[in-house]
Image: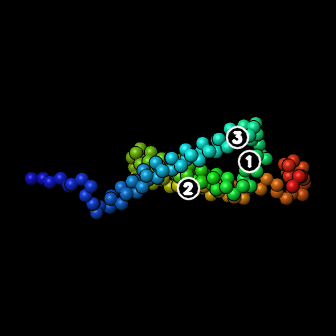
Amino acid sequence: MTSIDAPRQAHTSPRAKAQNWEKWGWIYMRASGVLLVVLIFGHLFFNLMLGDGIKAISFGFVGGKLADPFWRVWDVLMLWLALIHGANGMRTIVNDYASKPATAKILKGALFAASAVLILLGTLVVFTFNPCPEVSDPSLVASFCADL
């Protein structure tokens, strides 16, 4: 007589670790999705609903916003969560549709590299942004920099 393993029985196969990564990926997608909804709607509400709306969004508005540490952290958190969330979703699609293991490995490597570069560059932009750089020709900077 053949016996069937009881459900939720611990497995020691090499695949068990991969399944655990899939579980954590699934949990991350749900948690980051909820956080992203809050972050994105907060971002849109602050930028579009408060003040003068979309007419007020300019280089100066963004420069002023990125001068505030609160908004820097908000924007970087939104950037990181969105990029990792999207990359994890694309990884799932690669897992579902890449038929050859070598192809899947190449696609996942390219996905990881692109995500890492975008996260690095986006984070650098947010934390090193200076709306009033010191240049020799004042006509090259924004008009509000002369007031500072």
> Does label 1 or label 2 sit earlier along the sequence?
1
| Camera-nearest label, 3 or 1 | 3
Q: In this figure, which residue is indicated by the disc labeled 2?
A: 113
Identify which residue, 16 or 98, lies in the foreground: 16
Task: Tell which residue pokes out farthest to the left in this image.
Answer: 1
Mark 3 and mark 2: Cα distance apart in space: 37 Å
Q: Residues within 10 Å of mark 1 (few under 14, many from 20)?
A: some
- Kindly identify the amino acid type of the residue bearing the numbered disc 3: Leu
Tag 2: residue type? Ala
Is residue 50 found left or right of 7 in the rendered image? right
Q: Count residues near mark 2 (Cα–Cα under 10 Å), then give few for <14, some for 14-19, many for 20+.
A: few
How far apart are the two marked residues, 1 and 2, measured between alpha carbons?
A: 28 Å
The residue singled out by tag 1 in the image is 62
| Residue beneath the point at 74% across and 48% down | 62
Earlier residue among tags 3 and 1: 3
Kind of element beneath mark 3:
loop
- Tell me which amino acid carries mark 1: Val
Identify the mark at residue 50; answer none if there is no mark: 3
Residue 8's quadrant in the figure? bottom left
Left or right of 82 in this view: 18: left
Query: Taking the image as drawn, is residue 131 in sight?
Result: yes
Q: Is residue 136 left or right of residue 35?
A: right
Mark in front: 1 vs 2: 1
* Between discs 3 and 2, the one toward the N terminus: 3
Left or right: 134 as drawn, with respect to 67? right
- Element type where label 1 sits in the image: helix
Report whether residue 102 is seen. Answer: no
Asked whether disc 3 touches disc 2, contact meaning CB atoms under 8 Å apart, the reply is: no
